[in-house]
Image (spheres, rainbow, N blue to C red):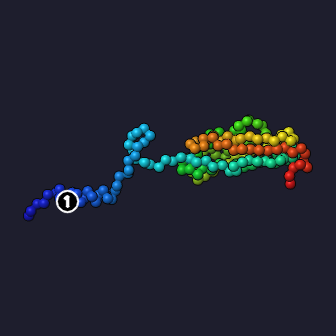
């Protein structure tokens, strides 16, 4: 029996193996090292409503006005809410406790903003600052507005 050299069969086997499982394409990382491109995961904050506007409120109805604010995460990593505060620190708006400070992807949490008593005829403008680990929007600015009517008859129906 005649022996055939093994090298004659190796190239077709290697070609078949490399066609079945190509290696990932190399890339350059930020530090110049060669690595593999893996998708980055990060949280992405969305807030609803985009503006909290209490409108004009009669003094007799101050305690009745509350707005629920929903914070959602449309990213693919957990969103961590680190702080919620008013930019100017006015005592006209009150913020309730947030339901959860950790928001998994495709989920949401909520809190309420209430209107505290204010002087008649005063227009209040402030921002809620929502601090999170969203790399694109580490501080989300949510405008908040309210105006006190002079008396109950000025309150819109």
Instruction: Name the foreground residue: 31 vs 113.
Output: 31
Looking at the image, residue 4 lies above or below residue 143: below
Describe the element under mark 1 as helix, strand or loop.
loop
The structure residue drawn at horizontal position 72% and vertical position 48%, both measured from the top left corner, is 51
Residue 61 coordinates in the image, percent (x, y)? 85, 47
Going by the picture, which residue comes out furthest to the bottom?
1
Q: Residues within 10 Å of mark 1 (few under 14, many from 20)?
A: few
Of 7 and 97, nearer the camera is: 7
Answer with left or right where residue 18 lies relative to residue 5.
right
Picture coordinates of residue 118, whole percent (x, y): 83, 40
- Quarter occupied by residue 146: top right
**Split into 4 quadrants, where in the image is the C terminus?**
bottom right
In what quadrant of the picture does the N terminus appear?
Answer: bottom left
> Is residue 136 found left or right of 56 in the rendered image?
left
Q: Identify the residue shown where x is 60% and y is 52%.
A: 107
Residue at figure coordinates x 67%, y 42% from the top left: 141
Residue found farthest to the top:
89
Q: Say whether residue 96 is visible.
A: no
Q: Position of residue 106 (x, y in %)?
A: 58, 53
Near-viewer residue (29 or 119): 29
């Amino acid at each position: 029996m005649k022996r055939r050299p093994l090298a004659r069969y190796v190239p077709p086997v290697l070609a078949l193996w490399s066609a079945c499982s190509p290696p990932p394409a190399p890339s350059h990382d930020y530090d110049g090292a060669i690595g593999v491109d893996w998708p980055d995961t990060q949280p992405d904050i969305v807030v609803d409503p985009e503006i909290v506007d209490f409108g004009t409120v009669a003094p007799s109805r101050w305690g009745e006005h509350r707005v629920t604010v929903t914070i959602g995460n449309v990213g693919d990593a957990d969103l961590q809410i680190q702080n919620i505060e008013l930019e100017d620190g006015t005592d006209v708006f009150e913020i309730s406790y947030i339901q959860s400070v950790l928001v998994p992807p495709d989920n949401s949490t909520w809190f309420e903003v209430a209107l505290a008593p204010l002087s008649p005829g005063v227009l209040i403008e402030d921002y809620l600052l929502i601090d999170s680990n969203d790399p694109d929007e580490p501080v989300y600015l949510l405008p908040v507005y309210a105006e006190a009517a002079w008396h109950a008859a000025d309150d819109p129906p």
